Amino acid sequence: MPDEPPRALDVDALVSYLEHDAQPMIVLDPEYRILAANTAYQRQFGVASQPHLGRKCYQVSHHYDVPCDQAGEHCPMKRAFELRGPDRVLHIHHTPRGPEHVDVELRPIFNAQREVVAYVERLSTVRGASAKPSAEGLVGRSTAFNAAISALHRVAPSMLPVLLLGESGTGKELFARALHEASERAQHPFVVVECSGITEALFETELFGYEKGAFTGAAARKPGLVETAQGGTLFLDEIGDVPLSMQVKLLRLIESGTFRRVGGIETLRADFRLVAATHKPVREMIDDGRFRQDLYYRISAFPIHLPAVRERPDDIALLVESILQRIDSTQGIAGRKFSIASDALARLHAYSWPGNIRELRNVLDRACLLADDGVIRIEHLPDDMVAAESAHLGNSTGSPSFSTRGELTDRELVRFAEEFSGTRSALAQHLGMSERTLYRRLKTRR
């Protein structure tokens, strides 16, 4: 037997094995070239007019001319080589359907001398979020948003309790619903408990239900929200508002998996996936006695930070277009499609959005009512927002002759990049954009 068997024979054998996997998979050499792909990959990601064999993976998936790490992204091949083991990352890939979130797992293949001779990449499209404008669901493609989606995709198949942490208006219920729909419980109920909207007196009856005659007015048995969520997901929104007296009963429910209806003696078995959310500083609440530490540890097995709008500036244009699509479909006038002028969009980019997506939706709802011709302009934005941003734009110093990313031309970007003395990461942060966006825009000016 020769010391080094022919590479083609090895690849053919590997692909024959991969054909039994329903997930799209490709084989890469250490120089990023695609050596082979299984049928599932060709069916889901292949384009007849654009053969992928022999091409670099970053050319096919990202339309880059350099590896991902040189374009400001995480490169799983580089990391897998360093780890001498698998690496996993969520990327935005170009697909026949447009840009999509794709979960990528890459594993190195070793020869007898423990040298990496190839890699197997497994791809899974993330269905819970859209990387292009969408009239429903989660939308985004920024680094901060992708980090949250990646965490959600990892934890969804498990039964771990998830705690969503983020400011008010960041879309916690949408994230919770996306997690539910990505789990094995997707065909069962998704039940929302609005903890901040239930009084202490009603919390127990709403959560556990009650028996007939349990109190005045209880004319019939009523199942609670825990019972309604059997087999599905129970989402406790704003769990930081749960009164201390009820926190101990909630803890008992989570720990024992059992409950009793108010006025009942029968112990019932609970079967739900727990997802909780809050915008409050729970750790500070533990320190001053407003939240039980043992309950916190029970609900926070897998915390996920949901980014504020100001942490994802690259998503603002995408969010605006998506919200306008939703407005078109729910309250638009027949034949009218709303759009936004570039200078008005620049103002939205420059604003800090303390109310996050909820505030952005309110601003666009109001602007659409004022935009008689369907085009949102600066004069349709709230007066206080325009005044505040005008002051901000007039006082900017230490930057080139532009004031918002929306007003920055590619020529100005190239000039400033040449004059900037820091790293590309620092430049991107200074300009309020991701490294990926910076790379793409500089690439167009080459």
Image (cartoon, rainbow, N blue to C red):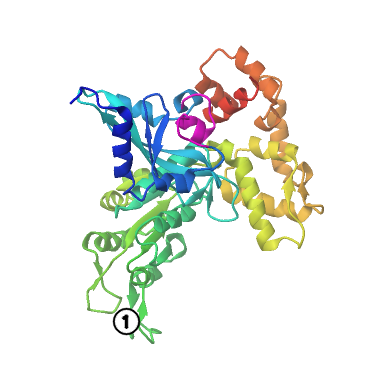
Kindly identify the residue that appears in the image at 62 percent across and 27 percent down. Answer: 441
Q: Is residue 258 inside the magenta stretch?
A: no
Q: In the figure, 286 relative to 202: above or below?
A: above
Residue 65 in view here: yes
**As rendered, which of 393 and 290 lies closer to the eye?**
393
Residue 105 location, quadrant: top left
Q: What's the magenta bit mostly, secondary-structure-wise?
A: loop
Kindly identify the residue that appears in the image at 53 percent across and 15 percent down. Answer: 422
Residue 398 in view here: no
Quarter containing the N terminus: top left
- The residue that mark 1 highlights is 211
**As rendered, which of 184 and 389 lies closer to the eye?**
184
Q: In the figure, 317 relative to 134: above or below?
A: above
Q: Element type at marker 1?
A: loop
Among all residues in the image, which is located at the extreme front? 1
Image location (x, y in percent) of residue 414: 64, 19
**Residues rendered magenta in the picture:** 51-67
Q: In the figure, 4 relative to 156: above or below?
A: above
